[in-house]
Amino acid sequence: MPSFTAKTCVQIPRLDGEDVHVWQLKLSGSLHGLSVSMLSEEEVEKVNRLRSPELRAWALSMRVQLRELLSLYLNLKPIDIRFQQAEFGKPSIINSALSFNVSHSADVALVAVSLCRELGVDVEQWRELDNLEGLVQRNFSRDEKHQWLSVSNEQKQQTFFNIWTCKEAFIKATGRGLGMGVRRCTFNLQSPYEIRQCPEQYGDAVDWRCVPLEFDGSLSATLMVRAKICEPFIFEFDSDNLPEMA
């Protein structure tokens, strides 16, 4: 698995061609000090529908930082960024060639930014699952289930989340979401975690780059992009010390 170390960015490199920037966001677990002033009414409503103060704080922190980050690329005020959703819910920026994708798990979020339209990222913190084998049977392809038989009990939790983030990142990149059916895409269960098979309407598997992202802690993360090559730049985002564009 490629290993990437997130680093604080003082100056954001220029995006060009198939470049991808991946930003690691640290989410606040408290609503104290967080402002909704730069969010749309729809975003505020979505945050307020969450069931606990901690979930609302994480969601609010993510949306605020996302707008702050994208504003640097777009040279706009955060409040002036306008989002839209495609047919199956994938977000995009109105009147912009910039593509982005977001994922968060507990207090960690990742934002992938690129000029590539077919881009997806997913992060999952490892946790105990009550019915791991049942999840494998429902969500893995036939080939993946065969590979699963060779995974040791000690490695099953990590392997499952590694592959789950691959699948989630891929269906997010296609824009189809879970409705596509995660069993229709097949990945290697061990490094290199490349995609072996995907639905024909999304091209050949060789058209896609699968990039596992290794960070400190018990979490899995994957970037998927439809491109010839993909060597992402990994940064940490600090809203108190915003970087400048190159």
Image: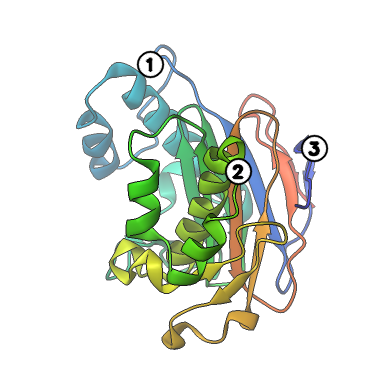
- Residue 31 disc label: 1
Residue drawn at x 79%, y 54% is 13
Position in image of residue 108 (x %, y %): 54, 32
- Residue 10 disc label: 3
Q: Is residue 120 visible from the viewing direction of this image? A: yes
Q: In this image, 169 relative to 191: left or right?
A: left
Residue drawn at x 32%, y 25% is 56
Q: Are marks 2 and 1 in contact (CB under 8 Å)?
A: no
Looking at the picture, tell me which residue is in the foreground, 144 or 90: 144
Foreground disc of the pair 2, 1: 2
Foreground disc of the pair 3, 1: 1
Inspect the image, locate mark 1, and give the three-letter code of the amino acid beneath it.
Leu
Inspect the image, locate mark 2, and give the three-letter code of the amino acid beneath it.
Ser
- Residue 152 disc label: 2
Which element carries disc 1, helix, strand or loop? Answer: loop
Q: In this image, 130 relative to 146: left or right?
A: left
Q: Is residue 30 above or below residue 136?
A: above
